[in-house]
Image (cartoon, rainbow, N blue to C red):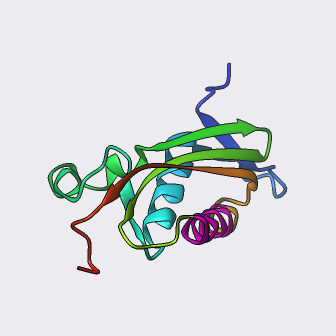
């Protein structure tokens, strides 16, 4: 029986075995990609203090991954910096996540939904 939290990224074309990617890894990739966008303070429920204490493993919080074959739908919840245009920043987040996940995993990202769960006023641009 196959684990529901494991995604097959590639078919075995060379007879060497299969490649499987945990959904949590896809979520972590998406979260890291989102936080690279200017104007994104972090993921919902993940603070810089928390990351310092527990490391990168907590980065996948704020991301829900739905996999259907090689298609992936991602739902991300972010905290934005005050002063940035929300629609423009969200478009950049969607583009960055789609490109990064597809390039790193070989999966097809069909949907990236972004939820703004908060605004940070203690950001870099103050």
Residue 27 placement (x, y as % from top left): 52, 48
Q: Nearer the viewer, residue 105 or 75?
A: 75
Q: Residue at x 26, y 78 (%)?
A: 124
Residues rendered magenta in the picture: 87-101
Residue 61 placement (x, y as % from top left): 40, 43
Q: Nearer the viewer, residue 20 or 48?
A: 48
Q: Residue at x 44, y 53 (%)?
A: 78
Q: Main secondary structure of the magenta part?
A: helix
User: Was residue 17 drawn as part of the magenta stretch in this picture?
Assistant: no
Report whether 104 appears left or right of 115: right
Report whether 11 appears left or right of 52: right
Q: Residue at x 80, y 50 (%)?
A: 12
- Can residue 18 be seen by looking at this rendering? no
Look at the picture and state if 91 lies above or below 9.
below
Look at the picture and state if 116 lies above or below 120.
above
User: Was residue 88 drawn as part of the magenta stretch in this picture?
Assistant: yes
Residue 55 placement (x, y as % from top left): 24, 54
Q: Nearer the viewer, residue 37 or 104?
A: 37
> Which quarter of the rendered picture does the N terminus lie within?
top right
- Residue extending furthest toward the top: 1
- Residue extending furthest toward the bottom: 125
> Which quarter of the rendered picture does the C terminus lie within?
bottom left
Q: Residue at x 42, y 72 (%)?
A: 39
């Amino acid at each position: 029986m196959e684990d529901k939290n494991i995604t097959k990224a590639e078919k075995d074309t060379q007879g060497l075995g299969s490649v499987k990617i945990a959904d949590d890894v896809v979520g972590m990739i998406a979260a890291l990609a989102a936080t690279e966008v200017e104007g994104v303070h972090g993921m919902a429920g993940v603070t810089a203090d928390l990351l310092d204490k527990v490391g990168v493993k907590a980065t996948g919080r704020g991301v829900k991954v739905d996999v259907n074959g090689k298609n992936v739908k991602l739902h991300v919840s972010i905290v934005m910096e005050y002063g940035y245009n929300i629609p423009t920043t969200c478009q950049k987040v969607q583009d960055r996540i789609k490109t990064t996940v597809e390039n790193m995993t070989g999966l097809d990202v069909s949907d990236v939904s972004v939820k703004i769960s908060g605004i940070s006023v203690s950001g870099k641009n103050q």
